[in-house]
Image: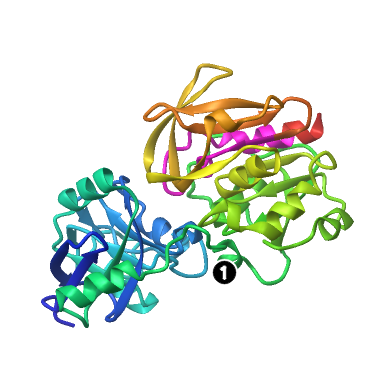
Amino acid sequence: MSTTQKAWLALETGEIMEGRAVGAMGEKSGDLVFNTAMTGYHEILTDPSYSGQVVLMTYPLIGNYGVAEEDAESCKAWAEAFICKEMCQTPSSHRADLSLPDWLRREGIVAIEGIDTRKLTRIVREAGSLRCVISTEESNPEALVKKARSAITTTGTNLAEVVSCKQPYTWEEGYQETYPFLAPAAATSRLRCVAYDFGAKRNILRSLVHAGFDVTVVPAGTPADEVLAMDPDGIFLSNGPGDPSAVTPAIDAVANLVGKKPIFGICLGHQILSIVLGAKTYKMPFGHHGANHPVRDILTGKVEITSQNHSFAVETDSLPDHLEMTHVNLNDGTVEGMKHRTESIFSVQYHPEAAPGPLDSTHLFSRFGALLRK
């Protein structure tokens, strides 16, 4: 396919940008988010947390190492569309199975290059969360802006239900041999963990197995009594897309699990826990998306560089007395972690499983195991 096929990007605020199509043909819309990671585009695109969102990469050259299928974080691409400054057509990596443009076309992801990504990022930073549309079919500015303004937003939408598994299943795979994990595999007896799938990445499940868990994954809407009937040692609440307040079946289920089993939550799981325990969440102006966010552990003073992907956050002032804030984002002071003062419950807003991203926080999975064994 010719790389000169035109494509257009429109924002709900009226801006129009013309570029070149480097993915599937068609038209897609959603919330526009920018990701500051230099690498990891394959893991980003296959992260279910990006459902409903159009991903803009701030790093100017994307695709130079192609796509290695073993790096996929789920069974498919979930991002609505993809934006970059320049797309590499010929990857240079012995691990590559496909070039990124070929993979995008196979996955049906509309993508555009040749956009001034710095300008676009500045617009989002100043205007806040924006809806957009990318099209290889429509070039009329008025029609494009109208489509952007009518795009479905993640606010108030239960996207966890869309990306979650439909039936329970067991997960037994640990880290791949090539994965540079820091903590040794758990040498003690195995623990039983039920993991709620709100859009769980594969490396989260691998991390749990590595930390000594036998993992059963259940759909997002699974009632508490069904989970308790499995008699797990602990409950894990995964990452996922969209508005936590809209995931009402999970909120009801978690409310009935508090105090009955130890619980560890990540990202959307952290937000759902906060709602259940009396805090409030809100949509951030432009969210945290990238692999280079500094977080300070308030309890130890240690600073960790973290991988993040969330558009909603917990209101700091809404934390009730029984919740202790344990981690803070050093860029904007937002809540990055909390724990219950009397129950065996803790959670973090960021992604300790990395993939892509730093490995600074993988110890949290071992901490969950230690909590259960204690």
Residue 168 percent across, percent down from the top left: 73, 66
Q: Viewer-proximal residue, 218 or 182?
A: 218
Amino acid under disc 1: Val
Residue 351 belongs to magenta span = yes
Q: Is residue 279 visible?
A: yes
Element on which disc 1 rests:
helix
Residue 186, picture quadrant:
top right
Residue 96 appears left or right of 214: left
Q: Please, is residue 317 above or below residue 46 in the view?
A: above
Query: Could you tell me which residue is drawn at 67 percent across and 32 percent down?
Result: 367
Residue 210, picture quadrant:
top right
Residue 333 percent across, percent down from the top left: 43, 27
Colour pattern of the rendering = rainbow
What span is in magenta? 346-369
Residue 159 percent across, percent down from the top left: 54, 63
Residue 118 appears left or right of 329: left
Q: Where is mark 1, residue-wise? A: 162
Residue 270 appears left or right of 104: right
